[in-house]
Amino acid sequence: MDKGFLWGAATSAFQLEGSAYADWAGWDASLRKNPSITNHYSLYEEDIRLLKSLGVNAYRFSVEWSRIEPREGVWDEGAIDHYLRVAELLGETHIEPMVTLHHFTHPLWFTRKYAWHEQSSTEIFLRFAEKITSRIKNVRYWITFNEPYVLLLGGYIEGCMPPGIRDAGLAVKALENILVCHARAYDMIHARTPGAMVSVAHNMAAIAPWNRWNPADRVLSRIGIYFYNHSLPDAFMTGELKFRLPLMKPINIRVPIKGKLDFMGVNYYTRVHLRFSPFRKMCGELRHRDLGGHGLTDLGWEVHPEGLERVLEYASRLRDQDGRQVPLIITENGIATHDEDKRIKFIKMHVDAVEKCIGRGMDIRGYFYWSLMDNYEWLQGLDARFGLYRVDFESRNLTRTPTAAARFYSGLIKSKSVTRA
């Protein structure tokens, strides 16, 4: 890996800071006990010192929309200045900031009044994006949306996250609006920052049939692989979003995103197995199985580093409008575990997988471990320990303690002779 490689850690604002104005604040009762979660909002200077001691040269963080616009059309300039200071302090510390505009959460008023399936949602979001990109300058790397498919599957298919809707038709409208927002935000950022690198963070998973001998399981897996992993990258090359899901008519919509991708952000965690079941939603059942012998995480996810190679191999087929390979950055990769030996092994196996892919000619320019410190893992609460730094959520000062994995990751980075990109 060359000296321009980005070695980083990734976080999101709400998962570290909380926000009383966010739709998620009232969604999960566990947040009532720890509304500020790690209190990163106040302790960010301390946490940037943790980054420096870790030795990373890049940090991915998000801005919390609900803090910045707590009421519709009312801007909290202090909150904007806060995130501006975070970006500036990272630069002063020689750490490349990567800013995420949207990482799952919304102001409560947005979810109640607009939500993504409403056409007016695009102008509302772009007003927010304009405000942020006009103030936070000298940032090269931007993520417009984190895991748009996860947002839609959770918020519009399963209904397990805001806005809590179960309507596939509205999900498609919401996805179209989100991709329109990406395209316009992409242009907005490039107009202000020549040479900017703008992407989405696309969650990709290794997907396999539950029973390889079962043709129905194999067909369902192929459908799942194309929809979940491939349809979005393909849309960036063709300008058309195409997929077909069980019990739904084929989707084929034009979206204005062709060529609007400077790198592909890949979030990768696990492999899933799909089993055909006519009595389940979309005729499928999802399970995790430890077939590779690397074990399961505390969330029951399979540890499967070979799957990272597979998803990167597909993502490396992405081409820009001049036919060049679109660079890849692993924008999230991590494990929920209380066992630091297991975390160390996870990091080593996945970094080894990245190096193999680079050796095969793939243009991979960064690896970000999720997460810098323990945080709020959405509906899993505070016990899913992803962090390189352990947070004592019971202590008055929310003490951060480096783990053995943090020391391992720091040593690994130093061994690669990394300098700032």
Image (tube, rainbow, N blue to C red):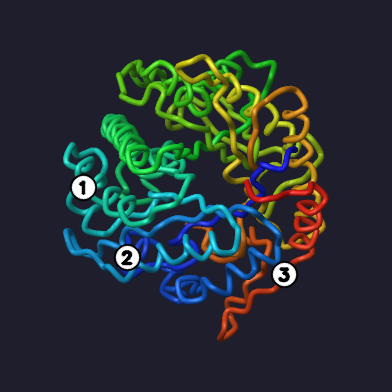
Cα gap from disc 1 to disc 2, whole angstroms: 15 Å
> Which of the labelled discs sits on residue 124, or is there none?
1
- Disc 2 residue type (three-letter): Arg
Q: Earlier in the sequence, mark 3 or mark 2?
A: 2
Disc 3 on helix, strand or loop? strand
Q: Toward the viewer: 353 or 271?
A: 353
Residue pointed to by mark 3: 402
Q: Are the residues at dot 1 and dot 2 in contact (C-beta closer than 8 Å)?
A: no
> Residue sitting at 32 percent across and 38 percent down?
191
Question: Is residue 168 visible in this depiction of the protein?
Answer: no
Q: Quadrant of residue 401?
A: bottom right
Cα gap from disc 3 to disc 2, whole angstroms: 29 Å
Where is the N terminus found, in terms of image quarters?
A: top right
Q: Toward the viewer: 295 or 107?
A: 107
> Residue sitting at 21 percent across and 58 percent down?
109
- Disc 1 residue type (three-letter): Ile
Task: Classify residue 213 as left or right of residue 11.
Answer: right
Q: Quadrant of residue 367?
A: top right
Q: Residues within 10 Å of mark 1 (few under 14, many from 20)?
A: some
Q: Toward the viewer: 134 or 37?
A: 134
- Residue 340 against residue 254 in the figure, above or below: below
Q: Earlier in the sequence, mark 1 or mark 3?
A: 1
The location of residue 93, given as percent across then percent down, is 59, 64
> Which of the labelled discs sits on residue 67, or is there none?
2
Q: Residue furthest bottom?
A: 396
